[in-house]
Image (cartoon, rainbow, N blue to C red):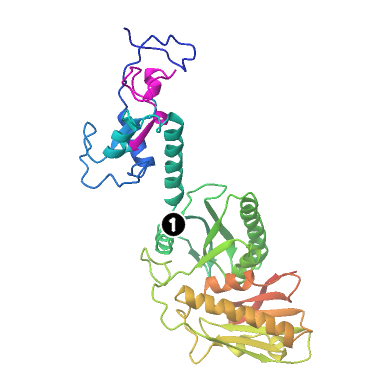
Amino acid sequence: MTKQTTKGPSEGRDRDTAVHRTAVPESTRLRLWAKAAGRCVLCATYLLDGADWTWHAIPNGQIAHIVGAGSGKESPRGDSALAADERAFEKNLMLLCYSCHKRIDDKAYRDQYTVEFLSAKKLLHENRVREVTDFATLRPTSVVTVSADVRGTRAPVSLPQVAEALRAEGYTGMGEDTRNGVFSVHLPGNDDDGWAWNAHRTEIDRFAARIAEAVTAGDVESLSVFALAPIPSLVYLGSKLDDKTETRLFARKRTDAVTAWAWSDDDGDVPVFDTVLRTGDANEATVLVELSGPVKEERLPGRLRELPRVTIAPKDESPRPDLLGSRAAMESFALAWRDALARIESELPSVRVLHLVAAVPAPAAITMGRHHMRGAQPNIVIYQLRNNTYEMAMEVGE
């Protein structure tokens, strides 16, 4: 008798032509072990303990044929139109323990272990493995980096430092892809240049539109934001970020170490914030946010000193640059900011414009923009310190 050499499914082939065993490629064996997660497809016995990793003899696990390897009378389920090479395909093979392999090929049980039964069990097991092992330790995220010249000094964002910060949070960047990987922008000019604020608005609008397009298309599941720029630009950026998309903000420490952007693992004492309102009869109010340092009264424009005032500052401690050193501290401030906006609506109902003067780290500035409800809450005019005086820079909500 001659070896069958038909290349495709052999419907109508001569049943008297014998099919002889074809060797299973090592690559197929590896895939079967991986897709079964090293467990017997039928009884789920773990097959890797003490395994002899030579593919000629692995006492704890064996590759079994569903349709028999050959067509002889002694071949289990061997009466099939499959060609010899097709019987060595992955679809016709399954990983079994020694006991299950012996049982399905035993003449006493062959009628119970049909091709249909074994194929269904193989598919069920491999699908379950795929589902229950979906436990990625690093979730993908789309990285947003924003940089600008701050007081004449360029403030770049280092991607190696970004990668370390993401790793510490259980995330991994998605690569430099124009659609959903790294969204990066450097804002032009200097905060001392009068034209810079309009240029920043234009760039941020264009930048935010790219991100929104990717979010709408479903290409972005989460955003991780690393930003170093003037406070007015960061508040405006925050107002342009979709508050329905999972967004994580990162703060840069005053260090050049690879962990410069990583949040502290130790939450320590999470600061609590006081919001103090000085009411008055006006349709505008001044908002002072003192986190990194105090806002000096003499630096405020005269008109702002006379308006109703809202002051947010840490309770029972002084403002300092590292006040928001942990994510828990950042969340505490976000809650205080939302509460302040709610109180303004309730206690200063006639106010239509808020003049914001803030000494805050970058994530806090972005947070203030993100949690401002455009159209429902007063517009925010943000000020920047220049020549020892706070000057109007940008507006949010107009």
Dividing the picture into quarters, in which one does residue 106 lie?
A: top left
Q: Amino acid at mark 1?
A: Leu
Q: Residue at x 35, y 12 (%)?
A: 18
Where residue 281 appears, as percent x and y from the top left, is: 78, 91
Q: Is residue 272 above or below residue 44?
A: below
Q: Is residue 76 magenta?
A: yes
- Identify the residue under disc 1: 159
Q: Residue 119 is drawn in which quadrant?
A: top left
Q: Main secondary structure of the magenta part?
A: loop
Percent of width and height locating residue 340: 65, 83
For residue 47, above or below residue 348: above
Say left or right for 299 vs 226: right
Q: Quadrant of residue 238?
A: bottom right
**Going by the image, does 80 lie left or right of 103?**
right
State which region is magenta.
68-95
52 in the magenta segment: no
Left or right of residue 120, residue 222 in this image:
right
Residue 219: x percent and y percent? Answer: 58, 49
